[in-house]
Image (cartoon, rainbow, N blue to C red):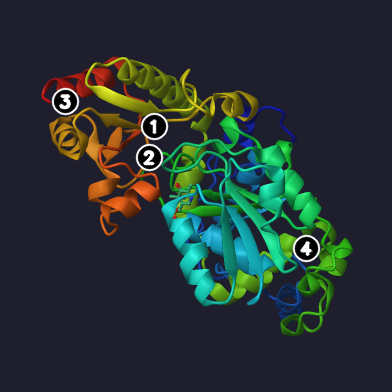
Amino acid sequence: MENFKHLETIAVQAGYEPQNGQPRVAPIVQSTTYAYDDAQAMADLFDLKASGHFYTRLSNPTVEVLEKKMAALEGGIGAMGTSSGQSATTALVLTLCNSGDHIVSTSTIYGGTTNLLGHSFEKLGIQTTFVDQTASEEEIFAAVRPNTKLIFGEALSNPSVKVLDFEKFARVARRAGVPFAVDNTFPTPFLCRPFDFGANMIVHSTSKYSDGHACALGGMLIDKGDFDFAASDKFPAFNTPDESYHGLVYTKTFGKFAFLAKARSHVMRDFGMMMSPQNAWLTNMNLETLGLRMERHSYNAKLLAEHLSQHPKVEWVNYPSLANSPDRELAKKYLKACSGVMTFGPKGGRAAAEKLMNSLKLAKIVTHVADTRTCVLHPASTTHRQLSDSEQIATGILPELIRISCGIEHIDDIIADFDQALAAL
Ligand SMILES: *Cc1c(COP(=O)(O)O)cnc(C)c1O
């Protein structure tokens, strides 16, 4: 396969190259299993001595096309597709951590990830310390313990659209001697390349912009291959025999592919959170236009944010490119553009927010974000409604906060919809 330089070309061409007479579009291989003539060939696959597909829980040709494309887009050495963004983060943690281990994560992350790390893994004996991502390097490093195995953050956070200071967290991870992993769901590789700023691994919810049409759930775990597990004394599972593989040692057999080999042959084998071929096919197709879509999402969102911030019935707008955003400098440094999501508060508190949401016509109320259609959500009455008013404010969810995911419709139609809803207040 050619090594293309530009993301626009990779998004269209990478991952699949038809041979003479084969289908132009990578086909959906909707098969659980693969046939072999020779018993030894199958045995070698099971022993990880040969590569090839044998069961779709472990790998599938359609999922593999998407994995190759996502790895190429991020500049990684390989990737593993998963059933959802949640399972990509789960696979990341389970590949690196055992019960008794510890993670340092920023507190400004997706709510589902906060629950996963702070509650579900906590119950399994893997603890997370959440740090303020605006704290100093020393303050963040103070959270590191001898049993810390991962530093984690979100490139552009959902829903608060805060920009991660990659280089600060990469320095903390290097001092701690552990991998630094980033959730790059919101910027996508078109707007941010975390591997260029010190990340070792990337996770994605491909359910968001990668699919981008709100039609397929999925996740992706991508490795840069530059964390030296063989030289570290913190990861014995990579450097000592795996009894469930006849004593195979991951770093010896797979070199820089040790992380992805363990993720697939251990975590995916045992937990089975694979991506379906159908969802991989849809996501792979939709990735072809990712660059065009991210440009338009970002362009529309910037104009809408500027329009709302000057509107007399709007109290505040939070979008990283705005002149008054505390993240403006970080956004300039790390992002090509600021993607399609923003939050804002109409004047008049929660009642005004609810009335405004009910008056919108083009923008529908949905839990999802990051697809072609403009949509809104009022977290205080939906995703965060179980929390008390004071708990909501503590997590940054003001009663009037509305999250907008700006679509790729014509910006004049989007603005007109918000204007007519604001006029009704
Ligand atoms: C949605 C989301 C996830 C979870 O992804 P699912 O595909 O819904 O499981 C993780 N991280 C971020 C930033 C998200 O927006």
Q: CA distance from mark 2 to mark 3?
A: 25 Å
**Label 2 is placed on what type of residue?**
His
Q: Are marks 2 and 3 in contact (CB under 8 Å)?
A: no
**Counting other residues with Cα less than 10 Å from the Cα at mark 2, is it few (<14), some (14-19), or many (20 or more)?**
some
Q: CA distance from mark 2 to mark 1?
A: 19 Å
Q: Nearer the viewer, residue 200 or 51?
A: 200
**Label 4 is placed on what type of residue?**
Ala
Q: Are marks 2 and 1 in contact (CB under 8 Å)?
A: no
Query: Residue at horizontal 49%, vertical 39%?
Result: 186
The nearer-to-camera label among 2 and 1 is 1
| Numbered circle sitting on residue 213 | 2
Q: Earlier in the sequence, mark 2 or mark 1?
A: 2
Q: Earlier in the sequence, mark 4 or mark 3?
A: 4
Q: Is residue 232 visible?
A: yes
Indicate left or right for 114 with 8 as reference. left
Indicate left or right for 266 with 407 as reference. right
Residue wearing tag 3: 421
| Numbered circle sitting on residue 258 | 4
Q: Nearer the viewer, residue 31 or 118?
A: 118
Query: Residue at horizontal 57%, vertical 30%?
Result: 191
The nearer-to-camera label among 2 and 3 is 3
Residue wearing tag 1: 342
Query: Residue at horizontal 55%, vertical 74%?
Result: 271
**Label 3 is placed on what type of residue?**
Ala
Q: Are marks 4 and 2 in contact (CB under 8 Å)?
A: no
